[in-house]
Image (tube, helix red, strand yellow):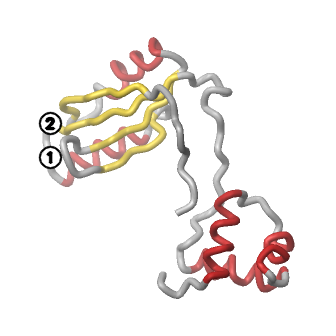
Amino acid sequence: MNDLDAIDRSLLRALSLDASRPAADLGRELGLSQPATWRRIRRLREIGALKGRRLDLDAAALGFGVTVFLGIKLASRGRASLEDFERAVCAIREVQTVEHVLGLYDYRLRVVARDLEDFERVLRRRIMTLPGIGPVEANVLLSEERLPGPL
């Protein structure tokens, strides 16, 4: 990944802000032709610097007014229990992210729900029945001051 030059980094920054921009526009901004811009984008995909395009949806505008972060400790550990847990938790559509972490908890989840009553239903019926589930800690998101952005 050390073979990225200043133009590659500028291209990544521009794409991270708006991945739908045409290559011609990006090229003009960076002093490249459209074909040269496309070659760079293709190369960035090939080396894994670009993983694809992403659409960011507004959860609140779609009726999901509550976001909760869960810290989950597994009751039992081992490769099989980790894989069983991960497979099961990834099947829950309200779970937006699953992060295997080091520290007090084994996993950190970002869960969206329509309201607290809906979150309680998801927690009781879906999350607390997961294989290997142990102690769970919930933190309700009050506000988000900075969204994930470019590296």
- Residue designated by label 1: 77
Residue at 62 percent of width and 63 percent of height:
52
Give the image location of residue 36, x and y in percent. 78, 85
Report the side of 124 relative to 32 (left or right): left
- Per the model, the C-alpha gap separating discs 2 and 1 is 7 Å
Q: Quadrant of residue 124?
A: top left
Amino acid type at image mark 1:
Arg
Res. 111 mark: none
- Front position in the image: 87 or 75: 75
- Secondary structure category for the residue under label 1: loop
Residue at 86 percent of width and 73 percent of height:
24
Amino acid type at image mark 2:
Ala
Report the side of 27 relative to 7 (left or right): right
The residue furthest front is: 145
Q: Quadrant of residue 75?
A: top left
Give the image location of residue 109, x and y in percent. 37, 38
Label 2 neighbour load within 10 Å: few <14, some 14-19, many 20+: few
- Secondary structure category for the residue under label 2: loop
Residue at 77 percent of width and 59 percent of height:
20
Give the image location of residue 110, x and y in percent. 43, 37
Residue at 29 percent of width and 25 percent of height:
128
Q: Are marks 2 and 1 in contact (CB under 8 Å)?
A: no
Compared with 92, 29 (above or below) is below
- Residue designated by label 2: 75
Compared with 75, 15 (above or below) is below
Give the image location of residue 79, x and y in percent. 20, 54
Label 1 neighbour load within 10 Å: few <14, some 14-19, many 20+: few
Compared with 71, 124 (above or below) is above
Q: How many marks?
A: 2
Report the side of 48 relative to 82 (left or right): right
